[in-house]
Image (cartoon, helix red, strand yellow):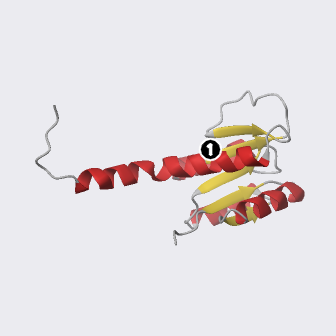
Amino acid sequence: MKPKRTILCVDDNEQSLSHRKIMLETRGYRVANFNRGEDAMTRFSQGGIDLVIAGMTMPGLDGPQFIAKIKELSPQTPAILISSKVRIYDHDSKADVFLTKGMYAPADLLERVRVLLVRKRGPKRLQHRSSVLPHHIGVA
């Protein structure tokens, strides 16, 4: 059985957090929920997080700031930013994916999570495969 991926969710909306946690856990992910960016940052710094999902607006450390800090510490960690605003976030964001709350189906979020996690582990698997190839194979 493959190890479960751990997703860190942070949003000041408890209902949104609860829905995401249930949806992700029923698909086999481990979920760590926080309603403050500072608390989520503390958990992230302990390690073992494979992907983060953050709400846009939160008191204190907001979603874009949280994701920027995550990317400073771990640029390869995928991040999804979710906003209740219909218009696309017009500031620079380090998020890999931007979703508007209520404008995407739960299956869309699950697919984005799956794709980002595959991309994250992809290069390691490719490097491993190439190291298994015999050394006598030449490049044309």
Q: Where is residue 11 in the image (x, y as percent from the top left)?
A: 80, 54
Inspect this view and state whether residue 38 appears.
yes
Is 95 on the left-hand or right-hand side of 90? left
Is 78 on the left-hand or right-hand side of 130? right
Is 25 on the left-hand or right-hand side of 121? right
Q: What kind of residue is marked 1?
A: Ala
Instruction: State the residue in front, 100 or 126.
Output: 126
* Vertical placement of residue 55 versus 5, above or below: above
**Farthest-out residue, bottom:** 1
**Farthest-out residue, left:** 136
Determine the image quadrant of residue 125. bottom left
Q: What number of labels is visible?
A: 1
Name the residue: 24% across, 54% down. Answer: 131
Inspect this view and state whether residue 77 appears.
no
Q: How crowded is mark 1: few (under 14 residues within 10 Å), some or many (20 or more)?
A: some
Determine the image quadrant of residue 82. top right
Determine the image quadrant of residue 112. top right
Name the residue: 65% across, 60% down. Answer: 7
Per the image, label 1 sits on a secondary structure element best described as helix
Name the residue: 50% across, 46% down. Answer: 119
Residue tagged 1 = 68
Q: Position of residue 60 (x, y in %)?
A: 79, 51
- Position of the C terminus by quadrant: top left
Q: Where is residue 109 in the image (x, y as percent from the top left)?
A: 72, 47
Instruction: State the residue in front, 126 or 1.
Output: 1
Instruction: State the residue in front, 46 or 26.
Output: 26
